[in-house]
Amino acid sequence: MTRCAVLNRRIALGGFSGRRYCQWLLLILLVASPLKAQPTLTFEQFYSKVSVLGLEFSDRVKQLSGQQIEITGFMAPPIKAESQFFVLTKMPMAICPFCSSDADWPEDILVVYLTKRQTFIQNNSMIKVTGILEYGTWRDENTGFVSLLRLRDAQFSEL
């Protein structure tokens, strides 16, 4: 064995032995492991059954209830320029929840309650919303708005 080969072997073994080996292994595991992604929900996953008897929430909705989720969609026109909630829709809509009857609204809408009041954006801009998912019929005492699905403590950003 040549002297150079011995040195290379020692350098190689020394570089990956003991404490240094553990540090490298930990670094590789941190870099290689993906960050825990936030669960996502789509409008198609809201209900498992739609019939004349009503809507049945999907197992996905029930599973994610109480968890922080992410969903993308469009903001329906709000009643005020600044408010603490809005309706998220699958497609851009130009109807107001207070000016229209509930028959005008599609079933797959999501009411979003923000952590703080903020200025809204155009209804044709796609947004990403994160918040804690809730399901079941609930009536907002301040506005009278009835919802089936909600996001609480939510935030949004334009995509």
Image: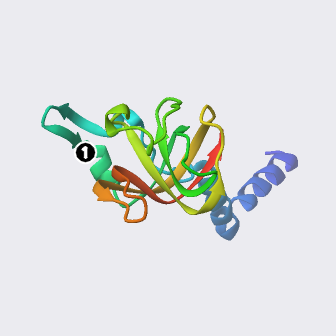
- Name the spot of residue 15 as percent of width and height, x first: 75, 59
- Name the spot of residue 99 as percent of width and height, x first: 45, 41
Say if 104 sits above or below 34 in the image. Answer: above
Residue farthest toward the bottom in the current orientation of the protein: 19
**Picture residue at 60% right of the left edge, 40% below the top:** 127
Residue corresponding to mark 1: 59
- Name the spot of residue 120 as percent of width and height, x first: 64, 48
Residue closest to the eye, 37 or 109: 109
Counting other residues with Cα less than 10 Å from the Cα at mark 1, is it few (<14), some (14-19), or many (20 or more)? few
Residue closest to the eye, 153 or 140: 140
* Residue type indicated by callout 1: Asp
Query: The N terminus appears in which quarter of the rendering?
Result: top right
**Picture residue at 44% right of the left edge, 46% below the top:** 98
- Name the spot of residue 71 as percent of width and height, x first: 49, 43
- The figure's colour scheme reads rainbow
**Picture residue at 71% right of the left edge, 57% below the top:** 13
In the picture, measured across the screen, residue 85 lies left or right of residue 116, that is left
Residue farthest toward the right in the current orientation of the protein: 4
Q: How many marks?
A: 1
| Quadrant in the rendering for residue 107 | top left
Name the element at disc 1.
helix
Query: The C terminus appears in which quarter of the rendering?
Result: top right
**Picture residue at 65% right of the left edge, 57% below the top:** 118
In the picture, measured across the screen, residue 52 lies left or right of residue 127, that is left
Residue closest to the eye, 145 or 28: 145
Residue farthest toward the left in the current orientation of the protein: 53
